[in-house]
Amino acid sequence: MEEAGRVFFTRREMSVNRLSVAADKLLVMDHLTFVPTTGQFFFWVDEGTSRMDTAALRASRMDTAALRASRMDTAALRASRMDTAALRASRSDAGARLLRAGWPAAARLIGGESEVPRTEGVLIELIDALPILAGASAMDLDGAAPEVAMWAATARLALSLVVRGQVWPRLLARRPGHGDERICGWEARWHVSLTPGLRGRVAQLARTLTTAQIAVVLGRGARQLTLSHVSGLSAITDVQQAQKATAAITDVQQARKASSGYSTRGLLRWMLDACADTLVREGARRGVYVRLGRWPADAWEQRLVRGLVEDEATFTTGEDDPEVLACELRQWAEELGVTPPLLSAPPSPPSWLATESLQQIIGRMVEPTAMLASRLLLGEPAPRTLVPAVPVPTSKLNQAVAVTRALIQATQSAGAGISASKKMSSERSKKAAG
């Protein structure tokens, strides 16, 4: 009886040890990727095991089945389950914050030749993910995959570019779908301006990724497609078209074709542009909507300004040729980027006829955006409202300066009069005493 109990106890220890060894080899790591079709982040926790680990787990399950028949091993079995559950729940601090900031969704992960048909995770809006990634330290990223640190560095780069005002507008053609060259509309978008040094920085960050893994959101978790891409993933504003496009892109072949248009460097550049575009519109929503004063509403300049701050980003066509305007706007932005500091670049494209230059209107748009980006860069959440500094009119400022100077002169004159009267009274008192 004692020998049988000793044998059972030894078997129980072996099962608990196998469970602990298998749990130690279980990889639990936070992963993050960008969803280019919606401008969101997709976060998931990868719980993968190797073949050896799987065999060990199966052996431990067989031992666990035998242990369940005895009451003596119940406590040990519960302890092992608690340890395994705690290990699965462990993730980086930055991953825990990202998990709380999103909502449950499923996505198909595609990168190169590999594909994961369905992965459960969370979708996170770009405006909510930026402060978490920008404010994450090395300790916060402990336990996360290397791409999470890469996205954190990219978020800090994007926010710093917006704070410095290195963003320019562009007109892009909307297309029905991937590979379809037909133009179904135009939209006004914001892009970041990268110097040669910053392009090298983006290339350095892109080398940390072996493949450009993207997430294709499945089911109703995907919101309406609103962002376009130069490779053909276009914006679709109609609800029915968005549902058709979402259903089409979930197909394996369509998704592979869509992912083939992204390189690692292109995916990072797309995220930088999406960050600039999102922050300018969020700054306008939380601050002040910018419009051209005393200018017709149907003029292309006014339509461009509306498209640059409104959520739909739609540039309504008129009598002007949008392709010509898009070419002029692109050439003007490129000229501003390469103009030496000592030379003056044109303040507006050639077709711009509004009294306020395009550079001035961009400055008014970027002012609240820079305030928003500076808050996010510090790791703080986006404020509900932005109150820009109201400049004091020059006439009122000059009037206030004149009044202040008059008060100072009056005070000095009064002081001089008081000192003179005191001097005269002292001389009179001296004469009377003498």
Image (spheres, rainbow, N blue to C red):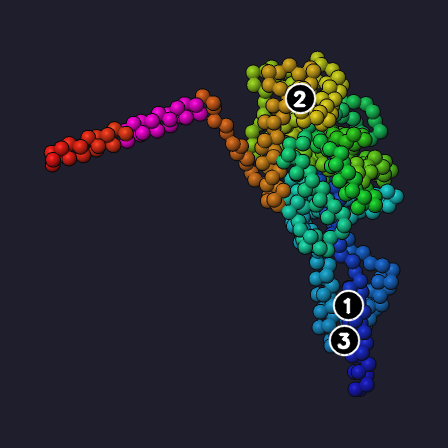
**Separation of marks 1 and 2 at Cα, in angstroms:** 69 Å
Frontmost of labels 1 and 2 is 2
Question: Which residue reaches farthest front?
Answer: 434
Question: Which residue reaches farthest bottom?
Answer: 2
Q: Amino acid at mark 3?
A: Ser
Residue bearing the label numbered 3? 70
Q: Secondary structure at mark 3?
A: loop
Q: In the drawing, what numbered circle is on residue 195?
A: none
Residue 408 counted in the magenta span: yes
In this picture, residue 418 sits left or right of residue 176: left
Q: Amino acid at mark 1?
A: Ser
Q: In the drawing, what numbered circle is on residue 20?
A: 1
Q: Residue at x 86, y 42 (%)?
A: 112
Instruction: Name above or below for residue 23 compared with residue 112.
Output: below
Asked where in the image residue 38 lies, by quadrant, the reply is: top right
* Mark 3 / mark 1, whichever is N-terminal: 1
Residue 422 counted in the magenta span: no
Boundaries of the magenta span: 396-415
Along the viewing direction, whichever of 48 and 95 lies nearer the viewer: 95
Q: Secondary structure at mark 2?
A: loop
Question: Which residue reaches farthest top?
Answer: 319
* Mark 2 / mark 3, whichever is N-terminal: 3
